[in-house]
Every structure is written in structure tokens, then in C-alpha cells.
Amino acid sequence: MAWLVLVVSGLLETAWAVALDRSAGFSRPVPTAVFAVTMVLSMAGLAYALREIPVGTGYAVWVGIGAVGTATVGILALGESASLPRLAALLLVVAGVVGLKVFH
């Protein structure tokens, strides 16, 4: 259960990062509210997962999911670069996250 909560929390990290960008410095109320809610839920899920998962592994997986998710949203929905080196770097992050889970 802790791993499932950790993955969902990582996805929520993606949501709050994108909402933070869309909030335009907290000047837009809806994205600001989405940011606040998803950040609290993401942190609460991380805290819950860390009761069973070592902090180094849990935090790295959480950040990795959030980073790859945010970069993917940027590429697919926000017009950010999808250059080969950038995609390769994202694959390395995914490999690291998978490695942390496998070698936990």
C-alpha cells in the first residue's frame, strides 16, 4: 500500500508543479487553489509512505515521478522541447526510479 500511495503522491507532485506554473505567481485563484490542495495531498501521501519505505528511497522515487511527470506534461501539453538529449535524460531518471524500487 505504501508504494501505491507513493506513486499517487508523485503524480500529485506533477499536478502541483504544473498548477504552480499556471498560477502566474499566485495571481490566478483557481490554479493557486489546485496547487495548494495537490501539494498538501502530495506531502501527506509522501509522509504516509515514509512510514514503511526508507526516506532516501521514498523521497527519490517521489521526486523522480514528479520530475518526469512534470517534464512530460511540459512536452506534451505546454510546448516544451522534446529533444533527444532531454528525452534520454528523462529515461535515465525513470531507470533510477525503477532501480530504487527493484533494489529496495
Image (cartoon, rainbow, N blue to C red):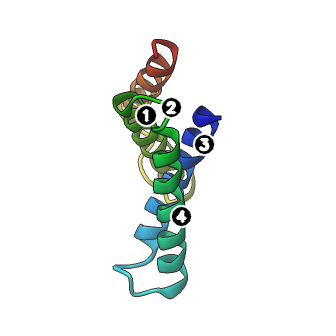
Question: Which residue bears the numbered disc 1?
Answer: 58
The amino acid beneath tag 4 is: Thr
Q: Residues within 10 Å of mark 1 (few under 14, many from 20)?
A: many
Mark on residue 5? 3
**Residue carrying label 2:** 52
Report x, y in % for residue 69: 51, 45
Mark 1 or mark 2, which is nearer the start of the sequence? 2
Residue 34 location (% of width, % of height): 54, 73
- As drawn, the label of residue 38 is 4
Which circle's residue, 1 or 4, is located before the other in the chain?
4
Separation of disc 1 and disc 4 at Cα? 18 Å
Q: Is residue 14 above or below residue 3?
A: below
**Label 4 crowd (10 A; few <14 / some 14-19 / many >=20):** many
What residue is rendered at 40% in x and 42% in y?
A: 63
Q: Amino acid at mark 3?
A: Val
Q: CA distance from mark 3 to mark 1?
A: 11 Å
Q: Earlier in the sequence, mark 2 or mark 3?
A: 3
Which mark sits nearer the N-terminus, 3 or 4?
3
**Is label 4 or label 2 in front?**
2
Q: Earlier in the sequence, mark 3 or mark 1?
A: 3
